[in-house]
Image: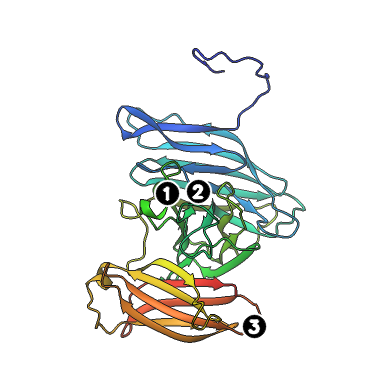
Amino acid sequence: MFDYGKNKLSGLPADLGFTGFRVLTPFNTPDLWDELVVFQGASYFRALGKNQRYGLSARGLALNTADAGGEEFPIFEEFWVQRPGQNSKDLVVFALLDSPSVAGAYRFVLRPGVATVMEVKAALYPRSGATIKTLGLAPLTSMFWHGESSATVNNDYRPEVHDSDGLLMERGSGEWLWRPLANPKEVRTVSFSDENPKGFGLVQRDRRFASYEDLEANYHLRPSVWVEPIGEWGRGQVRLVEIPTPDETHDNIVAFWVPEAPLRPNQAFEFSYRLTWFMEGQEGAKAPPGGTAVATRLGRSMTHEPELQRFILDFDSPYLNARQAEAKIEPVLSVGEGATLTHHSLQKNPFNGTWRVAFALRPDGSGRPVELRCFLRQSSHVLTETWTYLWQP
């Protein structure tokens, strides 16, 4: 079925089959056909915007991720590519999904650009007698080995190594949440309850080459991906799964939406959403309208109160950058059970204009994880997204 040109291939079995397909288009330069998207392996696919490098992946569906008994991986078994018109800016792909518990039909509309957009429409059909513990819609899979918040850099010469450094959420209430990613010592799952979410995504927020120092992997050019529901998704939760990884070769981060309502036998479950593959600071980027948490650092003083865990958070925005150090801005901190806040401070960084929150925690000795939240406000006005973190003493 293929013309291999001058390549001499032999011994290919007649039933070799296919692992997937790639789509190319000249969207970086007019005379060079670059990869736009690849569908390959189970229900995995990943795409690129202009001048981006492949990083995290999306999936058609996640089933029983991080549940006892193991995960079930649905497969896109067949694809149909609709022939585009002569001047078409879109490419339409249909896919048939198969799994022991669920069958599904998908329609993808791909629009390349500075930020590449994919509109997804799907219908799921549960199989008779199937038991689905966790139904994960619009799943994203990424990698986080170490970053500025890591206790160690694993003897690696690069300051940071990750495809994504945080989970960003715009809740149905309008609140924006930022959860920095971690490489935990054991599998960790956290859920954020919501109703009719406006969007969520795994984001590569740090775009400085100096943060990675990697000329081969180009982590500073890896895309972020934003999931935007089309229509109301009702009640459910954004779930984040973090899995230990010893190196950068394993995807150890998963994020997806878990609907509260289960699949109904003999009924189609239909949903639609939009995926945007973007980079911060470019057209199509997704970000809260206020300030953002641009850095999370952890450490201890070995000479003064070594039992305390210290956190350093940097917030930034044009508004914050323009405020003087004397501005009446305050941090709003909350510490869950398991630790006590001993002291905190806020000051403007005179070198780059960001605002730094520094605080210290004393664990209660129980060893249980501690949920943390922080944002900045001025009078009654919220100035930033809410930074949220799960600290394991």
Q: Is residue 258 above or below residue 310?
A: above
- How far apart marks 3 and 2 lie (CA) works out to 37 Å
Does residue 231 appear in the picture of this structure? no
Query: Quadrant where the N terminus lies?
Result: top right
Do residues under tags 3 and 2 come within 8 Å of each other at their CB atoms? no
- Horizontal and vertical percent for residue 133? 70, 60
> Which sits in the foreground, 356 or 333?
356
Residue shown at the point (31%, 82%) measured from the top left: 329
Q: Is residue 223 above or below residue 290?
A: above
Q: Is residue 58 above or below residue 132?
A: above
Q: Which residue is mark 3?
A: 365
- How far apart marks 3 and 1 lie (CA) works out to 40 Å
Which dot, 3 or 2, sits closer to the camera? Answer: 3
Secondary structure at badge 2 equals loop
Secondary structure at badge 1 equals loop
> Which sits in the foreground, 72 or 165?
165
- Horizontal and vertical percent for residue 331? 38, 81
The image quadrant that residue 243 belongs to is bottom right
Q: Is residue 302 above or below residue 128?
A: below
- In the picture, the disc for residue 56 is 2
Dot 3: few (<14), some (14–19), or many (≥20) neighbours within 10 Å?
Answer: few
Does residue 340 appear in the picture of this structure? yes
- Horizontal and vertical percent for residue 62? 62, 52
- In the picture, the disc for residue 223 is 1
Residue shown at the point (25%, 82%) measured from the top left: 327
- How far apart marks 1 and 2 lie (CA) works out to 7 Å
- Horizontal and vertical percent for residue 183? 57, 60
Residue shown at the point (66%, 63%) measured from the top left: 186
Q: Mark 2: which amino acid?
A: Leu
Q: Mark 1: which amino acid?
A: Pro
